[in-house]
Image (cartoon, rainbow, N blue to C red):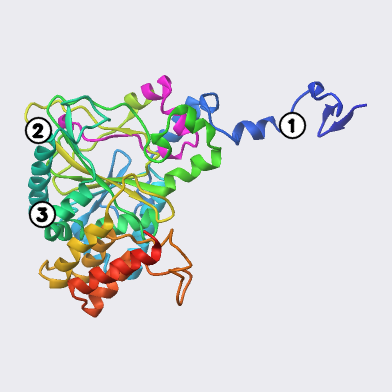
């Protein structure tokens, strides 16, 4: 016995007898899983060939190659006003999600001497690791570059005063919060690309961008949608980078392609990326931020004399986990005396930004038997404790004791 549904003949006892599946179009457009077969280059190209309307980024100084470029000097004071800060962050969040996916801030540091000082510390650390035969980079051929993993913690422990000045940057703080909300988790990795260093292939980043195609295909489509909102990619330019030196190749709007974690591995998508990507020269102290789902790749360093030096930041939502294991306890013990002495010349907002990059801002997981929420839904985080200790003028020993007590309560 058959009956008709929506103009189609259905035989309920013989599922092979559908004349046409009325849900087929819905399933094609909203598959439960993304695989190579669900990827369509024409759909991808249609997304990527949009033009960013300047009126969607009114706070940008200009738009180049669909990338909004902001003036750090102009924004720095504006971020001190809560309403202005909120409006700028909302603009960035929209652009990361549905716009071109990229934000560049020129003049991200008012004084680039802090960049030079950090560069020297990083170079010393790279040399020490080279001599100790550590610090290999699994993202590039041997000798093509030097990678300093967990440059965040290593800078903090090597020179915590410098760390406070370097990461006490309100522009970085605002961009991170714009996409991830408060209590984000900072990690960083130095990438020093030598003359002749080859380009990367197009890819997406952590989380799903660090999985194999087979593993990605096991995650349902809604998890593919979730992954990009859990992290933010960024870079601090430690030198002037001409196009010849190979600044990051970027494909505006590509982050909006939902099956992109399956697509970027396919040859036709890689070819489209190579034919349509854009690059911008960067100056020392410039900041680059982009949605981790954006198709991107490090460029080839075609120069003979430029050591392309970028400190890559991979920032995680408090609701997820970061790329690296970072000893925030030791970092906090190193940074606290610097902030307590008040000799860094940082504003209150800059101190708060430095703490955000150093201490754990999220109080979970914890042992709720020994560390229950008091006066709220969550116990204090390490960052909360550090701010409170500074406000109350804890001695260094008292702060250490408070941290130890917190770690014991958390079962760490």
The reply to whether the magenta stretch includes residue 267 is yes
**Image quadrant occupied by the N terminus:** top right
Of marks 3 and 2, which one's residue comes earlier in the chain? 3
Q: Which mark is on residue 22?
A: 1
* Residue found at x 16% / y 54%: 157
Verify whether residue 59 appears in magenta: no
Q: Residue at x 45, y 75 (%)?
A: 374
Q: How far, Cα to Cα, is label 1 from label 3?
A: 62 Å
**Numbered mark located on residue 306 in the image:** 2
Q: Nearer the viewer, mark 1 or mark 3?
A: 3
The residue singled out by tag 3 in the image is: 114
Residue at x-position 19% and y-position 25%: 142
In screen coordinates, is 185 left or right of 20?
A: left
Rounded to the nearest whole Å, what is the CA distance between mark 3 and mark 2?
20 Å
x and y percentages locating residue 354 in the rendered image: 23, 61
Q: Which residues are magenta?
A: 243-271
| Foreground tag (3 vs 2) | 3
Q: Nearer the viewer, residue 317 or 96?
A: 317
Q: Earlier in the sequence, mark 1 or mark 3?
A: 1
Of tags 1 and 2, the one toward the viewer is 2
Observer-nearest residue: 255 or 391? 391
Check disc 3 and report its element: helix, strand or loop.
Answer: helix
- Residue sitting nearer the eye, 246 or 194: 194
Residue at image x 14%, y 66%?
338
Residue 73 place in picture, x, y as percent: 18, 59
Label 1 environment density (alpha carbons within 10 Å; few <14, some 14–19, many ≥20) = few
Q: Could you say where residue 248 lies in the image, as x and y percent from the top left?
A: 25, 35
Q: 330 left or right of 338?
A: right
């Amino acid at each position: 016995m058959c009956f008709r549904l929506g103009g189609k003949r259905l035989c309920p006892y013989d599922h092979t007898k559908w004349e046409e599946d009325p849900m087929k179009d819905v399933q094609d457009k909203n598959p439960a899983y993304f695989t190579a077969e669900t990827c369509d280059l024409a759909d991808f190209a249609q997304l990527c060939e949009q033009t960013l309307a300047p009126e969607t980024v009114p706070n940008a100084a200009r738009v180049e190659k669909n990338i909004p470029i902001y003036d750090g000097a102009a924004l720095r004071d504006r971020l001190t006003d809560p309403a202005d800060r909120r409006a700028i962050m909302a603009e960035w969040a929209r652009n990361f999600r549905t716009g071109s996916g990229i934000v560049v801030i020129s003049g991200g540091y008012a004084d680039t001497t802090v960049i030079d000082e950090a560069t020297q510390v990083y170079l010393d650390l790279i040399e020490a690791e080279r001599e100790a035969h550590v610090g290999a980079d699994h993202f590039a051929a041997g000798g093509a570059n030097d990678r300093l993993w967990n440059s965040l913690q290593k800078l903090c422990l090597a020179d915590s005063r410098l760390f406070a000045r370097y990461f006490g940057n309100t522009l970085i703080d605002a961009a991170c919060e714009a996409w991830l909300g408060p209590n984000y988790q900072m990690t960083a990795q130095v990438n020093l690309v030598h003359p002749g260093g080859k380009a990367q292939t197009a890819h997406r980043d952590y989380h799903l961008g660090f999985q194999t195609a087979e593993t990605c295909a096991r995650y349902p489509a809604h998890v593919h949608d979730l992954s990009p909102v859990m992290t933010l990619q960024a870079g601090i330019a430690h030198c002037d980078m001409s196009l010849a030196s190979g600044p990051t190749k970027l494909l505006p709007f590509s982050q909006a392609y939902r099956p992109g974690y399956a697509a970027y591995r396919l040859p036709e998508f890689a070819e489209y990326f190579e034919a349509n990507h854009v690059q911008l020269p960067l100056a020392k102290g410039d900041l680059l931020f982009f949605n981790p789902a954006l198709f991107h790749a490090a460029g080839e360093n075609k120069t003979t004399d430029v050591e392309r030096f970028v400190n890559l930041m991979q920032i995680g939502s408090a609701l997820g986990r970061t790329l690296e294991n970072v000893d925030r306890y030791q970092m906090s013990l190193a940074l606290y005396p610097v902030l307590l002495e008040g000799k860094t010349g940082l504003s209150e907002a800059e101190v708060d930004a430095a703490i955000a990059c150093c201490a754990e801002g999220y109080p979970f997981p914890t042992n709720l038997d020994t560390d229950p929420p008091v006066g709220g839904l969550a116990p204090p985080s390490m960052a909360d404790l550090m701010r409170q200790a500074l406000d109350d003028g804890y001695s260094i020993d008292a702060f250490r004791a408070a941290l130890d007590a917190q770690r014991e309560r958390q079962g760490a």
